[in-house]
Image (cartoon, rainbow, N blue to C red):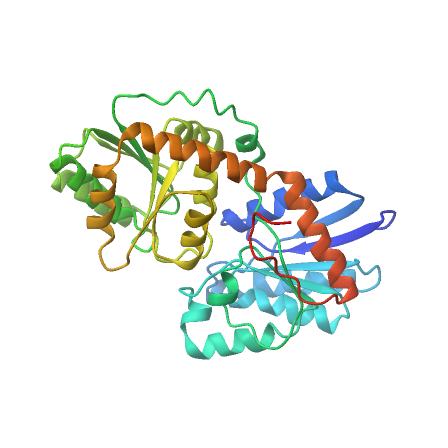
């Protein structure tokens, strides 16, 4: 990793379970290389969904840090998505590296909802030289003890989204177009989406809904069964996992993202949807509320998400929804340009070396 002004080792993600963290690592590396003189290596953590049979693979991945003990990178950046990821933090500090940690979780994740794990997590998060938070709300959700310096960085949207023409969305004017996308599950609010659609149908609201994302066979069976139970086969499509380009095309054709998840800290799909001129309707969580309050959308309570989402959508004029979505897209694209995101990340990494004081701006739109 020699021959560059700055060297960076990114640790995070699991190749066998690609998702948000893996995309975050890849996009941030590309953006940083463009932004400045960075030589970057990505090492997968192989920590997602660990079982007993995976422990050897995880231990072997953890041992790979030993290879960097001589030609030390200037910075090691650890992505914290679950408790095993913190083992990389401990080993990196023992090897004498300058370490920055970015959490990718919130208060409903097991490492934060379990009191014992939350305490252990808080203690281990005293170790890094800097914390790089992807949202200001993480300070409210994650146990952070001590006075570890911290910076606010931004998530990285797919670059193709940022280059889309807002004037050419291709959205049909006749009916409300709804999309729900993610890893389909109870926690992600997938089944609540069907319930909202049933209420909209009963209220006489013209709509068409698409559900995309992967799931196990049992979840798909339950989902199709619920759609059939409500007689929504002609109005709700289940597309399963689709390529990113196809998802972007569907987002551009949509008006509203129904994201009634109870587990996301700062949902990337909400930002992606808004950047495509899609207005989000989200469950009441700190990160989702911050996104909606900053850019636009609607938040429903945990107690009555279906009733509130359906009532709000039924009361909106479709042209008004599309106008609000366009305004949200302008703001998100401005704040989440790759150049701006890479600049915030580079500032955090360089401050990690200097042990600069705590710097958490008041808003993602600032600075």
* In the image, residue 311 above or below residue 135: above
Res. 311 visible in picture: yes
Give me the residue at 39% from left, 29% from top.
250
* The image quarter in which residue 47 lies: bottom right
Question: Quick check: 308 left or right of 349?
Answer: left
Give me the residue at 47% from left, 43% from top.
271
| Residue nearer the viewer, 43 or 21 | 21
* In the image, residue 309 above or below residue 285: above
Question: Quick check: 355 left or right of 109?
Answer: right
* The image quarter in which residue 70 lies: bottom right
The x, y position of residue 80, in whole percent, is 56, 62
The x, y position of residue 283, in whole percent, is 33, 53
Res. 231 visible in picture: no
Of all residues, the one furthest to the right in this rendering is 3
The x, y position of residue 32, in whole percent, is 71, 44
Question: Quick check: 11 left or right of 8?
Answer: left
The x, y position of residue 63, in whole percent, is 68, 65
* In the image, residue 262 above or below residue 195: below
| Residue nearer the viewer, 132 or 317 | 317
| Residue nearer the viewer, 270 or 24 | 270
| Residue nearer the viewer, 161 or 24 | 161
Give me the residue at 61% from left, 77% from top.
146
Question: Quick check: 150 left or right of 254?
Answer: right
């Amino acid at each position: 990793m020699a021959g560059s002004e700055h060297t960076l080792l990114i640790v995070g993600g699991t190749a066998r379970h690609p998702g948000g963290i893996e995309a975050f690592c890849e996009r941030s590396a590309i953006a940083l290389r463009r932004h400045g003189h960075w030589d970057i290596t990505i090492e997968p953590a192989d920590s997602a969904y660990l079982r007993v049979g995976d422990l050897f693979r995880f231990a072997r991945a953890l041992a790979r840090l030993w290879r960097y003990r001589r030609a030390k990178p200037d910075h090691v950046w650890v992505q914290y998505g679950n408790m095993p990821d913190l083992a990389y933090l401990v080993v990196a500090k023992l090897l004498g590296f300058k370490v920055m940690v970015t959490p990718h979780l919130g208060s409903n994740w097991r490492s934060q909802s379990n009191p014992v794990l939350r305490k252990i997590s808080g203690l281990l998060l005293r170790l890094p030289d800097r914390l790089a938070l992807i949202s200001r709300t993480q300070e409210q959700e994650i146990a952070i003890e001590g006075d570890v310096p911290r910076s606010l960085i931004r998530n990285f949207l797919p670059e193709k989204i940022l280059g889309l023409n807002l004037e050419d969305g291709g959205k049909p004017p006749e009916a409300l177009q709804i999309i729900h996308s993610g890893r389909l599950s109870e926690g992600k609010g997938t089944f609540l989406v069907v319930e909202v659609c049933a209420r909209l149908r009963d209220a006489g609201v013209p709509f068409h809904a698409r559900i995309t994302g992967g799931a196990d066979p049992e979840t798909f069976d339950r989902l199709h069964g619920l759609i059939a139970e409500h007689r929504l086969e002609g109005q709700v499509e289940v597309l399963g996992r689709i390529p990113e380009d196809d998802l972007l095309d569907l987002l551009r054709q949509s008006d509203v993202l129904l994201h009634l998840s109870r587990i996301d800290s700062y949902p990337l799909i909400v930002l992606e949807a808004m950047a495509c001129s899609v207005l989000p309707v989200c469950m009441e969580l700190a990160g989702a509320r911050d996104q909606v309050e900053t850019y636009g959308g609607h938040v429903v309570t945990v107690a009555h998400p279906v009733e509130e989402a359906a009532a709000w959508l039924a009361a909106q004029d479709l042209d008004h929804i599309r106008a609000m979505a366009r305004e949200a897209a302008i703001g998100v694209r401005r704040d989440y340009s790759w150049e701006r995101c890479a600049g915030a990340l580079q500032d955090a990494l360089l401050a990690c070396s200097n042990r600069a004081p705590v710097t958490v701006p008041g808003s993602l739109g600032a600075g």
